[in-house]
Amino acid sequence: MEQRELQLYQLKFNTAQMTVETIRDMYTTMPPANEELEALLKAYHNLHGNEFLGLCFGYASDSWSIHTWNDENDDAIRDFVYQIEQDEMFGTYHDAREEFLSKWANGEYEPSASWHIPKAFVEVIEPFNNLERAKEQIVEGLIAMERLDDNKNLHTYVIERDLTDDQAKQLQQLFLADENNNAVEIRKSEQGRWEAVY
């Protein structure tokens, strides 16, 4: 049976050369005001040199999805995420830093979408092949596996992960938007674990 896995990579932010113009060009809609772009630039520069685990998804093949990171990189990631949350259209914690910090510190923060960074500003260190270590490190992220069955039907499912309700909804939306996958239902088992049914 042929098997394809979404490969997890050890990556490093290489954002020191980013400019306001770089960030402005990343927007497909109207970019924010220059003051907000300057704050975003500072947050991107603060990420430089920090390492993280990431995935590349087919729907965003020119970017890395920020998956998880070690504790020593948490402050830089947190401040970057808070700056993303200042988006007046899509942000949830606009001018609400104390609330954001409290939820982050208590592990209650739930992003409204995954975080992506263009591949041009990321250094690939190596593929991350230690699944047991990945399971230990991944707290908020998801690992997904794709597998072709004997009839060449492609199935996607989660590897032994407890998901929050919001994560399950996000994963369901991802599957439904992927034309290469059969319909997949994400539901809770009788034991309270999320599982994929196909």
Image: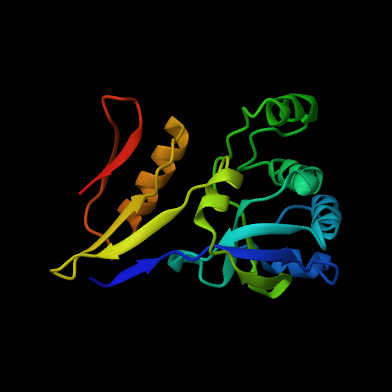
Q: How many marks?
A: 0
Q: Residue at x 35, y 45 (%)?
A: 172
Would residue 168 be found to the left or right of residue 122 on screen? left
Would residue 169 be found to the left or right of residue 113 on screen? left
Res. 44 in view: yes
- Choose between 47 and 91: the one closer to the eye: 47
Q: Quadrant of residue 30?
A: bottom right
Q: Residue at x 13, y 69 (%)?
A: 151
Q: Quadrant of the N terminus?
A: bottom left
Q: Residue farthest to the left?
A: 151
Q: Quadrant of residue 4?
A: bottom left
| Colour option used | rainbow
Q: Position of residue 123 (x, y in %)?
A: 71, 72
Q: Position of residue 112 (x, y in %)?
A: 55, 40
Res. 29 in view: no
Q: Position of residue 14 (x, y in %)?
A: 78, 69
Q: Position of residue 102 (x, y in %)?
A: 74, 24
Q: Residue at x 31, y 25 (%)?
A: 191
Establish if 27 lies above or below 70.
Answer: below
